[in-house]
Image (tube, helix red, strand yellow):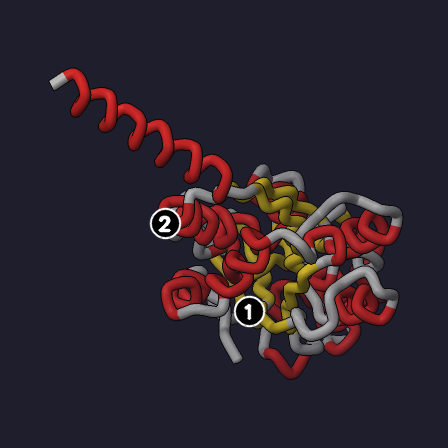
């Protein structure tokens, strides 16, 4: 009896050691608009693999700058395709690992449920608001898209003095949610977050008014030997992950 218990104990310890050795950590830099979906993807991935996802969210432009200066990230989930491609060209990302994980869409959103009735251009043109929030066009792709929309509508010069800029799309959304700004251009996915429970109102911007928001991920050179990072990229390409991503309002290629 003692021998059986001893053997079972050894087997348990061995299993724990193997699990500990095989489990890995993945450091992910993710664009702020994709923070909530990535949390959900990470939760499912961690449950089935034992790996751990360590996530940092912010603007794609700032992450690009940090990575070029040696920031120790394994993966980069950008809000555009430009910066992952540049990292490939600069030998800071693994060639062939880059892919489009989501296609973002832009919405003009307000926490006021009566603000919009599919009449975004009219609301913007009439200008019955003090502040309009957008992400910084220099560092955040969704901010670039917002600027393109205002230029296309002929409203950029008229409204630029009322614009408050978020460092990233997450901060931009917070400006509107907290009513610091009466309305703002945000990722459609943010307005579909279950936490909001359908509050507020929005105008989904026609996609001909801004460049496609192809969001790409890439394996960085820092993580090229990290098998857990490679496994997570493979998971994101799979059917379960794609269903989760679509559930947050993103389109897929």
Please tell me whether mark 2 sits on a helix, a strand or a loop. Answer: helix
Q: Which residue is mark 1?
A: 102
The image's mark for residue 48 is 2
Please tell me whether mark 1 sits on a helix, a strand or a loop. Answer: strand
* Residue 68 rendering spot, x and y as whole percentages: 86, 53
**Residue 63 visible from this viewpoint:** yes
**Callout 1 crowding tier (Cα within 10 Å): few <14, some 14–19, many ≥20:** many
* Residue 232 rendering spot, x and y as whole percentages: 52, 57
Q: Earlier in the sequence, mark 2 or mark 1?
A: 2
**Callout 2 crowding tier (Cα within 10 Å): few <14, some 14–19, many ≥20:** few
Q: Are marks 2 and 1 in contact (CB under 8 Å)?
A: no
* Residue 28 rendering spot, x and y as whole percentages: 63, 48
Q: Residue at x 85, y 71 (%)?
A: 89
Q: Which is more toward the observer, 160 or 167?
A: 167
Q: Residue at x 50, y 73 (%)?
A: 251
Q: Is residue 213 above or below residue 20?
A: below
- Identify the residue at the far bottom of this view: 208
Q: Nearer the viewer, mark 2 or mark 1?
A: 2
Q: Residue at x 24, y 27 (%)?
A: 7
* Residue 94 rendering spot, x and y as whole percentages: 73, 66
């Amino acid at each position: 009896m003692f021998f059986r218990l001893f053997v079972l104990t050894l087997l348990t310890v061995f299993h724990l050691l193997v699990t500990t050795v095989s489990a890995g950590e993945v450091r992910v830099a993710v664009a702020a608009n994709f923070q909530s979906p990535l949390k959900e993807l990470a939760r499912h991935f961690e449950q089935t693999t034992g790996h751990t996802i360590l996530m940092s969210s912010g603007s794609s432009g700032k992450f690009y700058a940090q990575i070029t200066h040696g920031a120790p990230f394994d993966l980069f989930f950008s809000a555009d395709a430009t910066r992952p491609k540049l990292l490939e060209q600069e030998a800071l990302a693994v060639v062939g690992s880059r892919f489009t994980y989501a296609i973002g869409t832009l919405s003009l959103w307000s926490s006021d449920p009566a603000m919009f009735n599919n009449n975004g251009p009219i609301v913007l043109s009439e200008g019955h608001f003090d502040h309009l929030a957008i992400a910084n066009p220099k560092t955040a792709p969704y901010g670039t898209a917002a600027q393109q929309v205002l230029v296309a509508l002929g409203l950029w010069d008229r409204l630029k003095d009322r614009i408050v800029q978020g460092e990233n799309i997450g901060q931009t959304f917070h400006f509107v949610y907290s009513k610091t700004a009466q309305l703002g251009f945000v990722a459609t996915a943010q307005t579909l977050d279950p936490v909001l429970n359908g509050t507020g109102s929005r105008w989904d911007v026609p996609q001909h008014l801004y460049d496609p928001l192809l969001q790409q991920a890439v394996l960085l050179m820092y993580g090229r030997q990290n098998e857990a990072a490679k496994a997570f990229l493979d998971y994101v390409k799979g059917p379960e992950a794609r269903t989760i991503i679509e559930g947050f309002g993103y389109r897929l290629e």
